[in-house]
Amino acid sequence: MKNSCLIPLCTLSFILFLAGCPESNSQSKAAKKISIEKQIKTKFENEILPPASSPCFAGAYYRKAYSSKDYWLGIGGTVTLPVIAYDPSRTNPKKSGAYLDNASVYLGGNSDEQETDIGLTWEVIRETDGSISKEHKAFRPFLRRTGYKSGQTAYYMNAPAEAKYYWYSGETVTMSLQLIESKKLKFIVEGAGKKYEQIFDVDGYDPTVMAQYKRVNAIDQVANEGKPAQATTAKVTGAKWVEAFLFRSVDGNVVKAPMHTKRFTDMQCPAKSHFKLSSFGESGESIDIFGSDKKKK
């Protein structure tokens, strides 16, 4: 009798176990999904953290947020463009109507020692009568790369001088720079009803190579690269990164990971006294840059 009772009990237990498996698998998948979503927002399991600091490169006043060297696939964000106020004493002797200080907001990266700077710079425009303005009047896209050991040469280009590629102070744009395949970066900037898109050849960039990516706001200085930043009363104010993110491949899908403060090295060059920064939200930041140390002027 005892043995005959054990058989149906075992059978019942086995049936209940099988019935519970789909639910268990479902819960496991849900837990994994939540885990990945959390990693995207905080830190991936194998993510390399950025260094606490990095040396400044002389030549300009710039705020740079630089990622770790990891398997990132690019960077992007949404930013409100700043206003530049020039130092009237620093006119460019070689270009009438131009100054020795300028504003730029851009992205970029470094992969296998090949550097890129890609974004918007305050530029001259083509006027409606076809002439080129003496003054800088609008933000225009630019793309720059250094040379590479493959023999690829250094290169710089601007978007065409056309009204559809001009952006202005106070406008909000979304910019992204993504490695879409080996040796190909795709740059997109759009906002205020305009869009520019460009595939850029970069031999040093590959999904299997660890790379760093950056966002930069700057007061650039003409013919001053590698030299100490020149004293100026110029200021660039009102920039606001509404969000910033890094591209990464997760389980075969490219995701956008918020570029929060734990995901970048904080660089304020040549010194923190030239910046007024304010963080907000998940990855937002307001940025004012002052050539002088008197931030509130």
Image (spheres, rainbow, N blue to C red):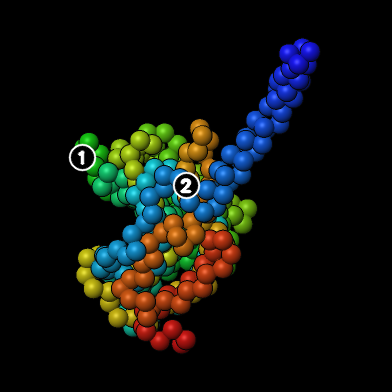
Q: Amino acid at mark 1?
A: Lys
Q: In the figure, is residue 161 to the left or right of 100?
A: right
What residue do we see at 37% from left, 76% from top? 272
Q: Position of residue 65 (x, y in %)?
A: 41, 61
Residue 15 position, x and y percent, is: 74, 20
Residue 114 vs residue 161: left or right?
A: left
Q: Residues within 10 Å of mark 2 (few under 14, many from 20)?
A: some
Q: Which mark is residue 119?
A: none
Nearest the eye: 43 or 93: 43
* Residue 201 location, quadrant: top left
**Residue type at tag 2:** Phe
Of residues 258 and 49, the one drawn nearer to the viewer in this rendering: 49
Residue 124 on image: x %, y %? 43, 62
Q: Which residue is mark 2?
A: 44
Work out how far the residue at label 1 is from the one at label 2, CA to CA, in angstroms. 32 Å
Q: Residue furthest front?
A: 1
Vertical placement of residue 135 versus 276, above or below: above
Q: Say which residue label 1 marks.
A: 149
Q: Quarter holding the N terminus?
A: top right
Q: Residue at x 33, y 80 (%)?
A: 232
Report helix, strand or loop for mark 1: loop
Q: Is residue 106 something one can see in this rendering? A: no
What residue do we see at 52% from left, 69% from top?
A: 279
Where residue 238 appears, as percent x and y from the top left, is 53, 72
